[in-house]
Amino acid sequence: MKEITIHQLKQLPKEDYQLIDIRDEGSVLYGMIPDAVCIPAASFDGEIDQCIEKLDQNRKIVLYCQRGEQSREIAAQLEERNLDAYSLSGGYNAFLMDMLLNESSEEAQIKAEKSIRDRFHKQIFTPFAKACKTYDLIQEGDHIAVCISGGKDSMLMAKLFQELQKHRKVNFELTFLVMDPGYNKENRALIEHNAKKLGIPITIFDSTIFDVVDTAEKNPCYLCARMRRGHLYSKAKELGCNKIALGHHYDDVIETILMGMLYGAQVQTMMPKLHSTNFEGMELIRPLYLVREEQICKWRDYNELRFLQCACHFTETCSTCHVDGTTSSKRLETKKLIAKLKESNPYVEGNIFKSVENVNLSTVIAYKKDGIRHHFLDEY
């Protein structure tokens, strides 16, 4: 099996090689190396001949995953079939680190902020401001901990808060809070680099969540989500904040509604704001509640930004863990289902969202309120 470093790859003429991204579709949503073709690693299992047909066998085949582990195995399989195949050493992470070392960020902040005010004002800033007003997310005198995971959603949310603060309609304070649950040095460096590049003054604190969760035998994603939320509340309160803001967007909301029905046998939604049950006086708000993920991705790509994924320790692709405890496989499955339904019903996304606004308690068998179960026969 042959490996190639990102430095060696950059020395080759682009026409001499074909880049193959073997990460799952959920990971690819966070960004790819330019000009790469996505063929998920799972496709090579039992379907290697069909995969080979998609490859340009007249060029070097350079495969990459997240860290450069899975790609070694598949490169070896292709080499056995006489293809000139290589594994990119360090994978997509190596590409990101190279980008950090070589890119200039002098104009990045200006471009990102201008794009929010101009190009993406209607698609992103307007629904952000609408959610803040509709759900009464920000009050006079608030001190909000903007929780930054390092991904596209939370980084954009931070920029939107900065823009909103310039309007001065409501006086509020911001602390841009980053928790390091045990990132490797490359992932932490990426967060710090992007924050500096975008002009976000972050406050970082450490925790050992990944080490604790690594030993969990059951529901590691759920445990990780609960622990992360608790640490964020605790640190935010320590810093004098009364709210934490998380970067869940519209698509997260409708996927959660549908997942609850299909996998949890319940009708519920991801609320735009919540009172903390364990930290008195603290609230959680979700100001991206009405912002579409597609527009967030367009903003990211327009500004040529590269962001972090979850970076947990459970899979090579680093994409299993979500802040609500769900796994990427189920979310991706639900996302695909919604996209399929949309082909025949263009209103399906809005209908899913509005379904939890139009609940008629007279037409449900039972429901819970404040932990108490009510059955229709109680008042029949």
Image: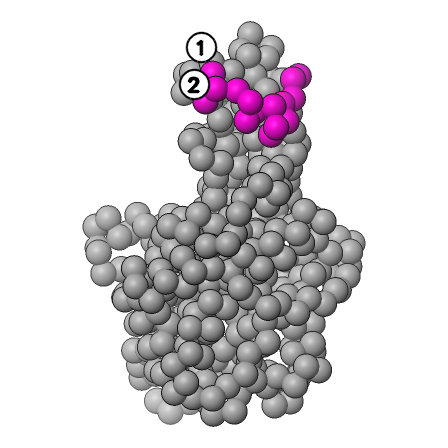
Q: Badge 2: few (under 14), some or many (20 or more) residues near its Cα, within 10 Å?
A: few
In which quarter of the view is residue 35 placed?
top left
The residue depicted at 49 percent of the width and 27 percent of the height is 20
**Which mark is first along the chain, 1 or 2?**
2
Q: Would residue 372 be found to the left or right of residue 133 on screen?
A: right
Q: Would residue 115 be found to the left or right of residue 1 on screen?
A: left
Q: Nearer the viewer, residue 335 or 85?
A: 85
The residue depicted at 67 percent of the width and 54 percent of the height is 188
Tell me residue 30's x, y (percent): 48, 48
Q: Badge 1: few (under 14), some or many (20 or more) residues near its Cα, within 10 Å?
A: few
Extent of the magenta region: 1-16
Label 2–label 1 contact, CB within 8 A: no
Q: Nearer the viewer, mark 2 or mark 1?
A: 2
Residue marked by disc 1: 58
Cα separation between marks 2 and 1: 10 Å
Q: Is residue 4 magenta?
A: yes
Residue marked by disc 2: 15
> Can residue 372 be spotted in the picture?
no
Question: Please, is residue 165 above or below residue 37 in the view?
Answer: below
Tell me residue 218's x, y (percent): 70, 56
